[in-house]
Amino acid sequence: MTENDFLPGSYGTLPQSGKVTWKAPSNIALVKYWGKRANQIPANPSISFTLDASATTTSVTYQKKEKETSDFSFDILLDGEPKADFKPKIKTFFERIEKYVPFLKSYDFTIETSNSFPHSSGIASSASGMAALALCLMDIEQKVAAEMGNDFFTKKASFLARLGSGSACRSIEGDLIQWGAHESIPESSDLFGIKYPFAVDSVFKNFHDTILLVHKGQKQVSSTVGHDLMHDHPFALKRFEQAHHNLDQLQGVFSNGDLEGFMALVESEALTLHAMMMTSRPSFILMKPDTLEIINKIWAYRAETKVPVCFTLDAGANVHVLYPESVKEQAIQFIQDELVAHCENGHYICDRIGNGARKLQ
Ligand code: DP6
């Protein structure tokens, strides 16, 4: 598919007003997206577990404007309170997607959003937030566009979400989503996420992700700036190649239920992401001392007990502790005994692999 496939045909009569609500989950990348080209095209393919508990719920109320104007008109509320500082990001999003959803300037919108996790938790809400908003807009489009199949609905929602935030395109469906063109993954695309098409052993089916909230403050460097620094990065090309290679490796890991291989690959991806940050010009460090303490404790615990618990990191100091359902009790005990002390105010979130976004009535 190409970008043009997402341009709509003619619309029927636009509804006067209405309200739609969608809940979209966050996701955690196993092979990381870090570096992008123009129009939100990723520099390398990535893959993620869709999460379950960490999610954004967004309602969009739309009211036809008396007279169409040349501006977007929207209000945005977080937990019921006006949130002016979200406006520029939404405006940029609307500008990027307008040609694909040309009814945007016909309405006054009220966007009401809330996250299942505290806003100040340091968990990025852009993936789940942009996914939920894209789904609301697709829901409106579905009412006026000619017959639209579910498959197209999902692909276009992912396509739009990507234009809001790259990783958001992996937050529409579950449970394992791949994004970015890759030679050996048929149907893979730079434009939207797809369900991972190959066999996945049942050991990876009910994976857990306990998110340790090491640092809840604002990040010093945003993902957008971080992606940008990959442009003149001395190791960029090798890194992009490595992501392709790691996706190939994962095929065997997933089909064979190879937990050892999984843990080695996922941890290497996490540390490589942060190594890219540390070797950018200017360089930056998002890990905190407690992030490193946690990593060392996970390694020591695994060496001693052989319990398959591993970690990954997002673009921040928080640590995602990953483990299969079969070792849930031991893993939680270990986390409580040894890791929670490194979390800000002892806070952590128990999450697990989920099935993707859903519409709320
Ligand atoms: C480290 O999707 O937040 O989480 O496209 O600029 O919005 P933008 O970036 P974003 O980057 C996510 C980076 C990451 C890795 C990943 O999720 O693959």
Image (spheres, rainbow, N blue to C red):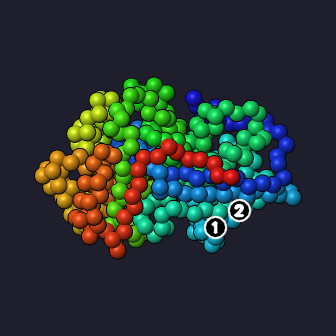
Give the residue at x 67% y 44%: 138
Q: Regarding mark 2 in the picture, which secondary structure is present there?
A: strand
Taking the spot 41% from the left edge, 50% from the top edge, the residue there is 352
Q: Secondary structure at mark 1?
A: strand
Q: Answer left or right for 3 relative to 144.
A: left
Q: From the viewer's perspective, is residue 355 above or below residue 3?
A: below
Q: Residue furthest right?
A: 66
Query: Which numbered disc flags the more N-terminal residue, 1 or 2?
Result: 1
Q: Position of residue 238 (x, y in %)?
A: 28, 39
- Dots 1 and 2: beta carbons under 8 Å? yes
State which quadrant residue 316 falls in: bottom left
* Marks 1 and 2, how far apart at CA: 8 Å
Taking depth in this image into account, of 19 and 146 the one nearest to the observer is: 19
In this view, the residue in front, 348 or 135, is 348
Q: Nearer the viewer, residue 294 or 284?
A: 294
Amino acid under disc 1? Leu
For the residue pair 349 and 5, the one nearer the viewer reads as: 349
Left or right, residue 120 beside residue 204: right
Which disc, if any, is residue 325? none
Q: Residue at x 71, y 36 (%)?
A: 8
Q: Amino acid at mark 2?
A: Thr
Q: Residues within 10 Å of mark 2 (few under 14, many from 20)?
A: some
Is the residue at mark 2 in contact range of ligand 1, meaning its CB lies under 8 Å from it?
Answer: no
- Residue 344 spot, x, y in % from top left: 34, 72
In the image, residue 323 lies at what x, y percent?
A: 30, 48
State left or right for residue 253 relative to residue 128: left
Residue that carries the numbered disc 2 in the rendered image: 110
Give x and y (percent) for residue 120: 46, 70
Give the position of the N terminus as an image quadrant.
top right
Q: Which residue is mark 1?
A: 77
